Image (cartoon, rainbow, N blue to C red):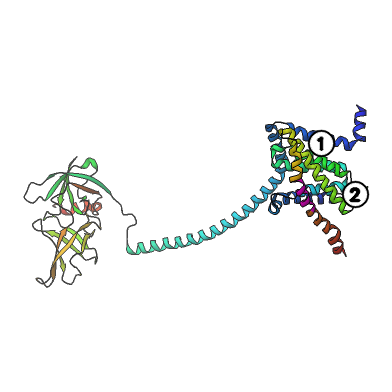
Amino acid sequence: MIKETATWLVAFAVTLILQTSFVPVISIAGIKPDLLLVALFFFSIRYGVMPGIFVGFFLGLGQDLYSPSLLGQNAFAATVTGALTGLFNERMMRTDPLIKAVLLLVAFIVHDALFLIVQVIRLGDPVSAIFSGLVLHTLPRAIYSIAFASLWYVWDVMVKPLARK
Amino acid sequence: MQWIIRFFVSHRNISSLLAVSIISLWMVSSSQMQQQHVARLLTITIFYPFQFYFNQTTRVKNIFAENRRLKEQIASLSVKVAQLTETTRENERLTDLLGISRQFSFTLVPARVVARDPSYVSRSAIVNVGAADGILPYMPVMTSVGVAGKVVQVMNRMSLVQLLIDPANRTSVMIGRTREVGILETTNGSDFYIMFRAHADVGVGDTLVTSGLGGIYPKGLLAGTVTKLEENRDPIFKKAFVKPEADFDRMEEVFVIKMSPQWAAFKEEIDSLEAPK
Protein backbone atom coordinates (compact mmCIF):
# COMPACT_ATOMS: atom_id res chain seq x y z
CA MET A 1 0.00 0.00 0.00
CA ILE A 2 2.73 2.41 1.02
CA LYS A 3 4.81 1.36 -1.96
CA GLU A 4 1.87 1.90 -4.28
CA THR A 5 1.11 5.31 -2.81
CA ALA A 6 4.78 6.33 -3.12
CA THR A 7 4.84 5.12 -6.73
CA TRP A 8 1.81 7.21 -7.57
CA LEU A 9 3.22 10.25 -5.77
CA VAL A 10 6.43 9.97 -7.76
CA ALA A 11 4.43 9.45 -10.96
CA PHE A 12 2.41 12.62 -10.30
CA ALA A 13 5.53 14.59 -9.45
CA VAL A 14 7.27 13.44 -12.64
CA THR A 15 4.12 14.22 -14.64
CA LEU A 16 3.95 17.70 -13.13
CA ILE A 17 7.62 18.31 -14.00
CA LEU A 18 7.13 17.00 -17.55
CA GLN A 19 3.97 19.09 -17.98
CA THR A 20 5.83 22.29 -17.11
CA SER A 21 9.15 21.54 -18.81
CA PHE A 22 8.85 18.96 -21.59
CA VAL A 23 5.29 19.48 -22.86
CA PRO A 24 5.74 23.11 -24.04
CA VAL A 25 8.59 21.87 -26.26
CA ILE A 26 6.40 19.33 -28.09
CA SER A 27 3.41 21.63 -28.57
CA ILE A 28 2.01 21.68 -32.11
CA ALA A 29 0.38 24.97 -33.15
CA GLY A 30 -0.13 25.84 -29.49
CA ILE A 31 -1.85 22.51 -28.75
CA LYS A 32 -0.27 20.70 -25.81
CA PRO A 33 -1.11 17.30 -24.31
CA ASP A 34 -2.38 17.42 -20.70
CA LEU A 35 -0.37 14.72 -18.99
CA LEU A 36 -1.78 15.56 -15.55
CA LEU A 37 -5.31 14.87 -16.70
CA VAL A 38 -4.16 11.63 -18.30
CA ALA A 39 -2.49 10.59 -15.04
CA LEU A 40 -5.61 11.53 -13.07
CA PHE A 41 -7.72 9.49 -15.45
CA PHE A 42 -5.62 6.33 -15.03
CA PHE A 43 -5.48 6.82 -11.27
CA SER A 44 -9.24 7.31 -10.92
CA ILE A 45 -10.29 4.32 -13.02
CA ARG A 46 -7.97 2.19 -10.95
CA TYR A 47 -8.87 3.40 -7.45
CA GLY A 48 -12.43 4.68 -7.74
CA VAL A 49 -14.40 7.81 -6.94
CA MET A 50 -13.12 8.88 -3.53
CA PRO A 51 -9.38 8.83 -4.35
CA GLY A 52 -10.25 10.37 -7.72
CA ILE A 53 -11.98 13.30 -5.99
CA PHE A 54 -9.08 14.14 -3.68
CA VAL A 55 -6.26 13.52 -6.13
CA GLY A 56 -8.19 15.53 -8.74
CA PHE A 57 -8.64 18.38 -6.28
CA PHE A 58 -4.97 18.54 -5.32
CA LEU A 59 -3.69 18.15 -8.88
CA GLY A 60 -6.05 20.90 -10.03
CA LEU A 61 -5.01 23.07 -7.13
CA GLY A 62 -1.36 22.49 -8.04
CA GLN A 63 -2.09 23.75 -11.56
CA ASP A 64 -4.00 26.74 -10.18
CA LEU A 65 -1.03 27.78 -8.08
CA TYR A 66 0.88 28.52 -11.28
CA SER A 67 -1.68 31.26 -12.03
CA PRO A 68 -3.37 32.45 -8.80
CA SER A 69 -6.05 34.35 -10.75
CA LEU A 70 -7.52 30.96 -11.77
CA LEU A 71 -7.46 29.65 -8.20
CA GLY A 72 -10.11 26.97 -7.72
CA GLN A 73 -11.08 26.71 -11.38
CA ASN A 74 -8.80 23.79 -12.27
CA ALA A 75 -9.35 22.29 -8.81
CA PHE A 76 -13.12 22.21 -9.33
CA ALA A 77 -12.88 20.82 -12.87
CA ALA A 78 -10.34 18.15 -11.92
CA THR A 79 -12.33 17.15 -8.81
CA VAL A 80 -15.50 16.47 -10.80
CA THR A 81 -13.50 14.75 -13.57
CA GLY A 82 -11.76 12.53 -11.01
CA ALA A 83 -15.12 11.65 -9.46
CA LEU A 84 -16.73 10.84 -12.81
CA THR A 85 -13.85 8.71 -14.12
CA GLY A 86 -13.79 6.97 -10.74
CA LEU A 87 -17.24 5.63 -11.53
CA PHE A 88 -15.66 3.43 -14.24
CA ASN A 89 -13.51 1.61 -11.72
CA GLU A 90 -11.46 -1.19 -13.27
CA ARG A 91 -12.15 -3.43 -10.31
CA MET A 92 -15.83 -3.36 -10.94
CA MET A 93 -15.86 -3.44 -14.76
CA ARG A 94 -13.43 -4.47 -17.44
CA THR A 95 -12.76 -1.90 -20.11
CA ASP A 96 -10.77 -2.45 -23.30
CA PRO A 97 -8.31 0.18 -24.60
CA LEU A 98 -10.72 1.65 -27.09
CA ILE A 99 -13.34 2.30 -24.39
CA LYS A 100 -10.64 3.80 -22.22
CA ALA A 101 -9.71 6.11 -25.06
CA VAL A 102 -13.31 7.19 -25.44
CA LEU A 103 -13.63 7.66 -21.67
CA LEU A 104 -10.47 9.76 -21.68
CA LEU A 105 -11.94 11.91 -24.44
CA VAL A 106 -15.13 12.33 -22.38
CA ALA A 107 -13.03 13.16 -19.32
CA PHE A 108 -11.29 15.90 -21.28
CA ILE A 109 -14.61 17.29 -22.49
CA VAL A 110 -16.09 17.24 -18.97
CA HIS A 111 -13.00 18.83 -17.48
CA ASP A 112 -12.75 21.62 -20.04
CA ALA A 113 -16.51 22.17 -20.12
CA LEU A 114 -16.58 22.72 -16.35
CA PHE A 115 -13.51 24.96 -16.57
CA LEU A 116 -15.07 27.04 -19.34
CA ILE A 117 -18.48 27.23 -17.63
CA VAL A 118 -16.89 28.62 -14.48
CA GLN A 119 -14.86 31.04 -16.59
CA VAL A 120 -17.94 32.23 -18.50
CA ILE A 121 -19.87 32.79 -15.23
CA ARG A 122 -16.94 34.53 -13.64
CA LEU A 123 -15.90 36.82 -16.48
CA GLY A 124 -19.30 37.20 -18.14
CA ASP A 125 -18.09 35.81 -21.47
CA PRO A 126 -20.71 34.68 -24.05
CA VAL A 127 -21.90 31.07 -23.75
CA SER A 128 -20.64 30.41 -27.27
CA ALA A 129 -17.13 30.64 -25.82
CA ILE A 130 -17.74 27.29 -24.16
CA PHE A 131 -18.53 25.53 -27.43
CA SER A 132 -15.83 27.22 -29.43
CA GLY A 133 -13.36 26.40 -26.68
CA LEU A 134 -14.40 22.77 -26.66
CA VAL A 135 -14.15 22.44 -30.43
CA LEU A 136 -11.06 24.49 -31.11
CA HIS A 137 -9.09 23.76 -28.01
CA THR A 138 -10.32 20.72 -26.11
CA LEU A 139 -10.71 18.23 -28.96
CA PRO A 140 -7.22 18.67 -30.44
CA ARG A 141 -5.75 18.64 -26.94
CA ALA A 142 -7.65 15.48 -26.06
CA ILE A 143 -6.56 13.71 -29.25
CA TYR A 144 -2.94 14.68 -28.68
CA SER A 145 -3.19 13.48 -25.08
CA ILE A 146 -4.82 10.19 -26.07
CA ALA A 147 -1.95 9.63 -28.49
CA PHE A 148 0.42 10.10 -25.57
CA ALA A 149 -1.68 7.87 -23.34
CA SER A 150 -1.51 5.12 -25.96
CA LEU A 151 2.28 5.14 -25.53
CA TRP A 152 1.64 4.34 -21.88
CA TYR A 153 -0.72 1.57 -22.98
CA VAL A 154 1.91 0.19 -25.39
CA TRP A 155 4.42 0.16 -22.55
CA ASP A 156 2.03 -1.37 -20.01
CA VAL A 157 0.42 -4.04 -22.19
CA MET A 158 3.10 -4.91 -24.77
CA VAL A 159 6.60 -4.03 -23.58
CA LYS A 160 6.27 -4.86 -19.89
CA PRO A 161 5.06 -8.49 -20.37
CA LEU A 162 7.84 -9.04 -22.91
CA ALA A 163 10.39 -7.70 -20.46
CA ARG A 164 9.03 -10.01 -17.77
CA LYS A 165 9.40 -13.03 -20.06
CA MET B 1 -27.18 15.72 14.21
CA GLN B 2 -26.57 11.99 14.07
CA TRP B 3 -28.60 11.57 10.92
CA ILE B 4 -26.39 14.13 9.21
CA ILE B 5 -23.25 12.18 10.10
CA ARG B 6 -24.94 8.95 9.09
CA PHE B 7 -25.93 10.54 5.75
CA PHE B 8 -22.38 11.70 5.07
CA VAL B 9 -20.94 8.28 5.93
CA SER B 10 -23.42 6.41 3.80
CA HIS B 11 -23.05 8.85 0.88
CA ARG B 12 -19.42 9.63 1.36
CA ASN B 13 -18.61 9.87 -2.32
CA ILE B 14 -21.29 12.48 -2.98
CA SER B 15 -20.47 14.29 0.28
CA SER B 16 -16.75 14.42 -0.51
CA LEU B 17 -17.45 15.66 -4.01
CA LEU B 18 -19.77 18.33 -2.68
CA ALA B 19 -17.38 19.43 0.04
CA VAL B 20 -14.36 19.64 -2.26
CA SER B 21 -16.41 21.32 -5.00
CA ILE B 22 -17.69 23.90 -2.53
CA ILE B 23 -14.13 24.64 -1.43
CA SER B 24 -13.04 24.97 -5.08
CA LEU B 25 -15.94 27.25 -5.94
CA TRP B 26 -15.31 29.34 -2.83
CA MET B 27 -11.77 29.87 -4.08
CA VAL B 28 -13.10 30.79 -7.54
CA SER B 29 -15.63 33.28 -6.15
CA SER B 30 -13.25 34.98 -3.71
CA SER B 31 -11.69 38.32 -4.54
CA GLN B 32 -8.40 38.53 -6.44
CA MET B 33 -6.55 39.67 -3.32
CA GLN B 34 -7.94 36.73 -1.34
CA GLN B 35 -7.03 34.35 -4.15
CA GLN B 36 -3.46 35.62 -4.18
CA HIS B 37 -3.30 35.36 -0.39
CA VAL B 38 -4.57 31.76 -0.42
CA ALA B 39 -2.28 30.84 -3.32
CA ARG B 40 0.71 32.30 -1.48
CA LEU B 41 -0.28 30.46 1.70
CA LEU B 42 -0.67 27.16 -0.14
CA THR B 43 2.54 27.63 -2.08
CA ILE B 44 4.47 28.31 1.10
CA THR B 45 2.85 25.38 2.93
CA ILE B 46 3.28 22.89 0.12
CA PHE B 47 6.53 23.95 -1.43
CA TYR B 48 8.45 25.39 1.55
CA PRO B 49 9.68 21.98 2.86
CA PHE B 50 10.92 21.00 -0.60
CA GLN B 51 12.43 24.44 -1.12
CA PHE B 52 14.07 24.30 2.31
CA TYR B 53 15.73 20.94 1.64
CA PHE B 54 16.70 22.06 -1.87
CA ASN B 55 18.26 25.23 -0.44
CA GLN B 56 20.12 23.26 2.20
CA THR B 57 21.49 20.91 -0.45
CA THR B 58 22.56 23.86 -2.59
CA ARG B 59 24.13 25.51 0.46
CA VAL B 60 26.13 22.41 1.34
CA LYS B 61 27.19 22.11 -2.30
CA ASN B 62 28.28 25.78 -2.26
CA ILE B 63 30.17 25.27 1.00
CA PHE B 64 32.08 22.38 -0.56
CA ALA B 65 32.89 24.47 -3.63
CA GLU B 66 33.95 27.42 -1.47
CA ASN B 67 36.06 25.17 0.72
CA ARG B 68 37.86 23.81 -2.34
CA ARG B 69 38.39 27.34 -3.70
CA LEU B 70 39.75 28.59 -0.34
CA LYS B 71 42.13 25.64 -0.11
CA GLU B 72 43.50 26.49 -3.54
CA GLN B 73 43.80 30.13 -2.49
CA ILE B 74 45.63 29.18 0.72
CA ALA B 75 48.07 27.02 -1.24
CA SER B 76 48.71 29.85 -3.70
CA LEU B 77 49.14 32.43 -0.91
CA SER B 78 51.47 30.15 1.05
CA VAL B 79 53.78 30.02 -1.95
CA LYS B 80 53.61 33.81 -2.28
CA VAL B 81 54.32 34.32 1.46
CA ALA B 82 57.32 32.01 1.24
CA GLN B 83 58.62 33.92 -1.80
CA LEU B 84 58.11 37.29 -0.09
CA THR B 85 59.77 36.12 3.13
CA GLU B 86 62.76 34.95 1.13
CA THR B 87 62.88 38.28 -0.76
CA THR B 88 62.69 40.23 2.52
CA ARG B 89 65.55 38.24 4.00
CA GLU B 90 67.61 38.72 0.84
CA ASN B 91 66.87 42.47 0.95
CA GLU B 92 67.97 42.65 4.59
CA ARG B 93 71.19 40.78 3.82
CA LEU B 94 72.01 43.02 0.85
CA THR B 95 71.13 46.15 2.82
CA ASP B 96 73.47 45.06 5.60
CA LEU B 97 76.18 44.27 3.07
CA LEU B 98 75.85 47.67 1.42
CA GLY B 99 75.65 49.45 4.77
CA ILE B 100 72.65 51.44 3.72
CA SER B 101 70.64 52.94 6.49
CA ARG B 102 67.13 51.53 6.36
CA GLN B 103 65.56 54.75 7.55
CA PHE B 104 66.78 57.78 5.60
CA SER B 105 64.35 60.61 6.16
CA PHE B 106 64.56 64.16 7.36
CA THR B 107 62.27 67.13 7.67
CA LEU B 108 62.52 70.10 5.35
CA VAL B 109 61.72 73.54 6.76
CA PRO B 110 60.73 75.96 4.01
CA ALA B 111 62.25 79.41 4.34
CA ARG B 112 62.22 82.66 2.44
CA VAL B 113 65.42 84.59 1.68
CA VAL B 114 64.82 87.98 3.32
CA ALA B 115 68.24 89.60 2.92
CA ARG B 116 71.48 89.14 1.01
CA ASP B 117 75.04 90.09 1.80
CA PRO B 118 75.45 93.55 0.20
CA SER B 119 78.96 92.84 -1.00
CA TYR B 120 79.85 92.53 -4.68
CA VAL B 121 79.47 88.80 -4.57
CA SER B 122 76.84 87.94 -2.06
CA ARG B 123 78.32 85.15 -0.07
CA SER B 124 75.60 84.68 2.50
CA ALA B 125 71.86 85.10 2.90
CA ILE B 126 69.44 85.64 5.73
CA VAL B 127 66.36 83.42 5.86
CA ASN B 128 63.15 83.93 7.88
CA VAL B 129 63.38 80.82 10.06
CA GLY B 130 65.34 80.59 13.29
CA ALA B 131 65.64 78.93 16.66
CA ALA B 132 61.90 79.28 17.17
CA ASP B 133 61.44 76.98 14.20
CA GLY B 134 63.90 74.44 15.53
CA ILE B 135 66.80 75.60 13.37
CA LEU B 136 70.31 74.89 14.65
CA PRO B 137 73.77 75.89 13.39
CA TYR B 138 75.28 73.72 10.64
CA MET B 139 71.95 72.56 9.32
CA PRO B 140 72.21 72.12 5.52
CA VAL B 141 70.26 74.42 3.22
CA MET B 142 69.11 73.53 -0.28
CA THR B 143 67.05 74.99 -3.09
CA SER B 144 64.49 72.98 -4.95
CA VAL B 145 67.21 71.68 -7.28
CA GLY B 146 70.33 71.25 -5.20
CA VAL B 147 72.51 72.09 -2.24
CA ALA B 148 72.85 75.81 -1.43
CA GLY B 149 74.87 76.15 1.78
CA LYS B 150 74.66 75.73 5.52
CA VAL B 151 73.29 77.64 8.51
CA VAL B 152 76.10 79.34 10.39
CA GLN B 153 74.29 81.60 12.80
CA VAL B 154 70.85 81.29 14.34
CA MET B 155 68.66 84.00 15.79
CA ASN B 156 65.16 83.61 17.16
CA ARG B 157 63.29 84.21 13.91
CA MET B 158 66.15 84.42 11.42
CA SER B 159 69.25 82.52 10.39
CA LEU B 160 72.39 83.35 8.46
CA VAL B 161 73.18 80.92 5.68
CA GLN B 162 76.69 80.56 4.35
CA LEU B 163 76.28 79.86 0.64
CA LEU B 164 78.48 77.60 -1.49
CA ILE B 165 79.79 80.67 -3.29
CA ASP B 166 81.65 81.71 -0.14
CA PRO B 167 85.33 80.74 -0.72
CA ALA B 168 85.47 79.69 2.92
CA ASN B 169 82.73 77.12 2.34
CA ARG B 170 84.15 73.86 1.07
CA THR B 171 81.91 70.89 0.47
CA SER B 172 82.71 67.20 0.21
CA VAL B 173 81.13 65.81 -2.98
CA MET B 174 81.50 62.78 -5.21
CA ILE B 175 80.91 61.83 -8.82
CA GLY B 176 77.58 60.05 -8.95
CA ARG B 177 78.73 57.62 -11.64
CA THR B 178 82.12 56.56 -10.32
CA ARG B 179 81.86 57.53 -6.61
CA GLU B 180 85.16 59.49 -6.84
CA VAL B 181 85.25 61.86 -3.86
CA GLY B 182 86.56 65.44 -3.96
CA ILE B 183 86.16 68.86 -2.36
CA LEU B 184 84.02 71.42 -4.15
CA GLU B 185 85.50 74.87 -3.70
CA THR B 186 85.70 78.30 -5.24
CA THR B 187 88.09 81.20 -5.03
CA ASN B 188 85.96 83.96 -6.51
CA GLY B 189 82.40 82.81 -5.94
CA SER B 190 81.71 82.13 -9.60
CA ASP B 191 84.16 79.46 -10.75
CA PHE B 192 83.79 76.20 -8.92
CA TYR B 193 86.25 73.36 -9.21
CA ILE B 194 87.37 70.07 -7.71
CA MET B 195 90.89 68.71 -7.66
CA PHE B 196 90.86 64.99 -8.51
CA ARG B 197 93.78 62.60 -8.74
CA ALA B 198 95.08 62.39 -12.33
CA HIS B 199 93.87 58.84 -12.89
CA ALA B 200 90.37 59.43 -11.42
CA ASP B 201 87.49 58.46 -13.68
CA VAL B 202 85.81 61.80 -14.22
CA GLY B 203 84.16 63.06 -17.38
CA VAL B 204 82.39 66.15 -18.62
CA GLY B 205 78.68 65.94 -17.82
CA ASP B 206 79.16 63.83 -14.70
CA THR B 207 76.78 64.71 -11.91
CA LEU B 208 78.05 65.62 -8.49
CA VAL B 209 76.28 64.74 -5.26
CA THR B 210 77.21 65.40 -1.66
CA SER B 211 79.31 62.56 -0.28
CA GLY B 212 77.99 62.72 3.29
CA LEU B 213 81.61 62.60 4.50
CA GLY B 214 81.88 66.25 5.51
CA GLY B 215 79.58 65.71 8.44
CA ILE B 216 77.13 68.46 7.52
CA TYR B 217 75.30 67.53 4.32
CA PRO B 218 73.48 64.25 3.99
CA LYS B 219 74.66 61.91 1.30
CA GLY B 220 73.16 62.22 -2.16
CA LEU B 221 72.09 65.88 -2.43
CA LEU B 222 72.59 67.16 -5.97
CA ALA B 223 75.47 69.67 -6.04
CA GLY B 224 76.40 70.37 -9.67
CA THR B 225 77.68 69.09 -13.02
CA VAL B 226 81.20 68.80 -14.40
CA THR B 227 81.55 71.24 -17.31
CA LYS B 228 85.27 71.14 -18.15
CA LEU B 229 88.39 69.17 -17.33
CA GLU B 230 91.92 70.49 -17.06
CA GLU B 231 94.23 67.47 -17.14
CA ASN B 232 97.62 68.37 -18.62
CA ARG B 233 98.86 71.13 -16.32
CA ASP B 234 99.54 68.93 -13.30
CA PRO B 235 100.94 65.36 -13.39
CA ILE B 236 99.31 64.46 -10.03
CA PHE B 237 95.94 66.20 -10.10
CA LYS B 238 93.38 67.17 -12.67
CA LYS B 239 90.97 70.02 -12.23
CA ALA B 240 87.27 69.55 -12.93
CA PHE B 241 85.26 72.71 -13.36
CA VAL B 242 81.75 72.54 -11.98
CA LYS B 243 78.50 74.40 -12.54
CA PRO B 244 76.42 74.36 -9.31
CA GLU B 245 72.81 73.28 -9.59
CA ALA B 246 71.47 76.08 -7.36
CA ASP B 247 71.05 79.48 -8.95
CA PHE B 248 72.52 81.77 -6.32
CA ASP B 249 71.60 84.98 -8.14
CA ARG B 250 67.89 84.22 -8.17
CA MET B 251 67.51 82.42 -4.87
CA GLU B 252 64.21 83.32 -3.19
CA GLU B 253 62.97 80.20 -1.42
CA VAL B 254 65.13 77.61 0.24
CA PHE B 255 64.72 74.60 2.50
CA VAL B 256 66.58 74.01 5.72
CA ILE B 257 67.21 70.33 6.30
CA LYS B 258 66.39 69.65 9.91
CA MET B 259 69.21 67.35 10.87
CA SER B 260 72.03 67.57 13.31
CA PRO B 261 75.58 67.37 11.95
CA GLN B 262 77.01 63.89 12.24
CA TRP B 263 79.71 65.15 14.56
CA ALA B 264 77.23 66.83 16.96
CA ALA B 265 77.48 63.87 19.32
CA PHE B 266 81.21 64.57 19.75
CA LYS B 267 80.89 68.34 19.95
CA GLU B 268 81.99 68.60 23.58
CA GLU B 269 85.14 66.57 22.93
CA ILE B 270 85.92 68.66 19.84
CA ASP B 271 85.37 71.92 21.74
CA SER B 272 87.59 70.73 24.58
CA LEU B 273 90.33 69.92 22.07
CA GLU B 274 90.04 73.34 20.42
CA ALA B 275 89.85 75.30 23.71
CA PRO B 276 93.13 76.98 24.75
CA LYS B 277 94.80 75.15 27.62
Mark 1 surroundings: few (<14), some (14-19) or many (≥20) residues within 10 A: many
Q: Quadrant of the N terminus of chain B?
A: top right
The three-letter amino acid code for the residue at tag 2 is Glu
Does A43 appear in magenta? Answer: no
Q: Is residue A152 left or right of residue A28?
A: right
Q: Quadrant of residue B38?
A: top right
Region in magenta: A137-146
Q: How many marks?
A: 2
Up-down relation of residue B225 to residue B44 (above or below): below
Query: Secondary structure beneath disc 2?
Result: loop
Query: Secondary structure beneath disc 1?
Result: helix
- Asked whether residue A72 is in view, the answer is no
- Residue B204 position, x and y percent, is 17, 66
- The one nearer the camera, B153 or A129, is A129
Pointer 1 indicates a residue of which chain? B
Which residue is rendered at x = 33% and y = 54% of the image? B103
- Residue B57 position, x and y percent, is 67, 51
- Residue B18 position, x and y percent, is 84, 34
* Main SS category, magenta section: helix
Give the spatial CA distance, label 2 vs label 1. Answer: 24 Å
Which residue is rendered at x = 6% and y = 50% of the image? B120
- Asked whether residue A140 is in view, the answer is yes
- The one nearer the camera, A31 or B34, is A31
Q: Residue furthest top?
A: B1
Residue with the mark numbered 1: B20
Up-down relation of residue B99 to residue B53 (above or below): below
Pointer 2 indicates a residue of which chain? A
- Residue B10 position, x and y percent, is 93, 35
The three-letter amino acid code for the residue at tag 1 is Val
Does A138 appear in magenta? Answer: yes
User: Comparing marks 2 and 1, which lies closer to the viewer?
Assistant: 2
In the picture, the disc for residue A90 is 2
